Image: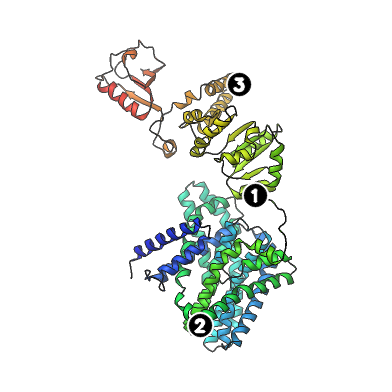
Amino acid sequence: MHFGVLANIIIVLFAAVLVTTVLRRLRLPPILGYLLVGTIVGPYGLDWIDDSQNIIQLAEFGVVFLMFTIGLEFSLPKLIALRHSVLGLGGLQVLLTSIVAGALAFWHGFDITASLVIAATIAMSSTAIVSKQLKDQLELNQPYAKNAIGVLLFQDLAVIPFLILIPSLANGQHDVWAPLFLSLVKACVVLLIMLSLGRWVLRPLFQEIAKARSLELFTLTVLLVTLAAAWLTEVSGLSLALGAFLSGMMLGETEYRHQIEVEIRPFRDILLGLFFICTGMLLNYQILDKAWLPLLMLIALITIIKAAIIYGSARLLRINNKNSLQTALILAQGGEFGFALLSLALSDQVIPVGTGQVILAALVFSMAISPFLIRYHEPIANFLLKQKKKPERAAPHTLPQETLQRVSTVQNHIIICGYGRVGQNMARFLALENFEIIAVDMDPKRVIDAELAGHTVVYGDSGNLSLLKSIGLEKARALVFSFVDGHTVLNILPQIRLELPNLPVLVRTVDDSQLTLYQKAGATEVVPETLEASLMLSFQTMILLHIPPRKAIRHLMHARKNRYQLLHEYFPGEELEDNSDFTPEKKQLAVVTLDDNAYAVGVRVKDLALEDVALTAVRRGGIRGDEPSPDTELKGQDVLILYGTPQQLARAEKKLLQG
């Protein structure tokens, strides 16, 4: 059954959402869901996709964007520090794996060219799976992860000579040294150009783009740089992924690294998922009935023997036992470059189609196993090395032992919910007065970094009362919600007030739209960012205008004492920043000009009966009178300043003009 292009995309997205949701419920890696979707909708399953080649070409950009974001994590000094992993471990792994796999293929009756194809295919690992899984697990900076990335980078380079050798040998050409030397020179020139452009062009370029203050232009520039770098390396005979990695690495040294990663992430995640779906489309599960034994043997060769070779290579380079085994487990799978080599060999008729399908199926199955090996590499390594797990810093989802011990004795401490910039700045100020601080945050990387820096930060949901109690809520001196999440705060505040009615609770909010709700829910103090910024700007302006500091401070204290009532009154504009927090119940200012025939002309203020709308001022003849007297009689061309909700203001305006 075949559908149009749009229907193909809808089918793929629907199946991906459905299967991935189920797997996440089962706590299984989403990559398995993508592979399964590809198998189901692909040509060997329900055959719903009739334009798979175009989809595959599009999906390759998922790997490009992934390697770009991986590059952002690495600077040039870091890459130089990885030279032993890239050249040493990477070179040794590709060489030894190719020799062993090629020898086994030749022993099973394949000719030299077919043996070379099989050897090269098995030597490659999956850049996409390894990089994504390690990034998701926040392990890119671990020694074994750096070893794995170094090996993958060498594999990206090693695929070039294989791509030259296979067609040359298939056509009977044995003089391959000249093309290999030419490709090496070309690779060196391209890498030098890439590094030079990154250092002297990209930073000034992004400085100019940032000055434009256009998010759209910034995103377009990121896409242009990523794809241009990938294209440059591809036309030079290198891989798309290598160019993307290098451009990411260059931009990783700029101050725009974090914003770039935010902008590229949606493209990366969508296209990378599509890449894994396309990988699943290649699997012909019908061969399981006829060639299950060779398939199992090949899967074992790719995983067990390859892992053993990587482990041995790492030990030869004096990498410690556990890191060597973890690196081996992480890289024990086939890779996307194996598909490229296999496709080239099939098109040149180097290996039979049936054999190619078995190899391809083995690659896909090894990639399906890989997320489990990468996720559980540490317990597997401990088991194989018969090591008891040493007490280490707890995982983000549990309270560290040191924190538990500290909480058992600490009291009068401050609990800060949310350890972003605001929470961390608060902690620094409070530390000046020697207050004990325990923070809660949902960002695992931030928790890990803060713990390494010596801060007491635990991973968890601040809306969970049990978690707050476990870090000594009953003994705390104050509780601060430094993040902006009204739903969480409004849910947890009544629970806290029920058990601890006297605990001071401070809440941060963007503006005053929910100030009353927070106060009713039990907040001791609510600090609206927008209004506090207004106060501080006003205060600094008054100081610059030589208003006495005592008088300026008195104005500030009066505004805070009256719950920012003066600052609640503002005129909403059409800009998004003014209306992004709009709610029908939020009060605001509005202006009504009375024409000579208006109903309110000649009526005294006390007789207006405007219900819940307040008349805050009347402007007449260029003179403004605040809080007009009840006996003031309104005249034509008076400008009335009203305060109320949008609905109340609309009714009041109609009454003033029409009666």
Question: What secondary structure is found at the residue carrying circle 3?
Answer: helix
Q: Nearer the viewer, residue 33 or 73?
A: 33
Q: Which of 505 and 236 is in front in this view?
A: 505
Q: Say whether marks 1 and 3 touch (CB < 8 Å).
A: no
Q: Say whether marks 2 and 3 touch (CB < 8 Å).
A: no
Q: Which of marks 2 and 1 is nearer the N terminus?
A: 2
Q: Quickly name the residue at label 2.
A: 355
- Using the image, determine if residue 270 lies above or below residue 153: above
Mark 1: few/some/many CA within 10 Å (<14, 14-19, 20+) = some
Q: Can residue 143 be seen in this view?
A: yes
**Residue at figure coordinates x 49%, y 59% from the top left:** 23
Q: Earlier in the sequence, mark 1 or mark 3?
A: 1
The N terminus, quarter of image? bottom left
- Left or right of 329? Residue 290 is left
Q: Where is residue 46 in the image (x, y as percent from the top left)?
A: 38, 70
Calculate the distance from the C-alpha at mark 2 to the C-alpha at mark 3: 85 Å
- Using the image, determine if residue 414 lies above or below residue 355: above
- Left or right of 58? Residue 407 is right
Q: Which of 139 and 229 is in front in this view?
A: 139
Which of discs 2 and 3 lies nearer the camera? The answer is 2
Mark 2: few/some/many CA within 10 Å (<14, 14-19, 20+) = some
Q: Which mark is residue 549?
A: 3
The scheme the figure's colours follow is rainbow
What's under tag 3, amino acid-wise? Answer: Pro
Q: Position of residue 122 (x, y in %)?
A: 58, 76
Q: Quadrant of residue 594?
A: top left
Q: Which mark is residue 558?
A: none
What's under tag 1, amino acid-wise? Answer: Ile
Which of discs 1 and 3 lies nearer the camera? The answer is 1
Q: Quickly name the residue at label 1.
A: 448
Q: Quadrant of residue 75?
A: bottom right
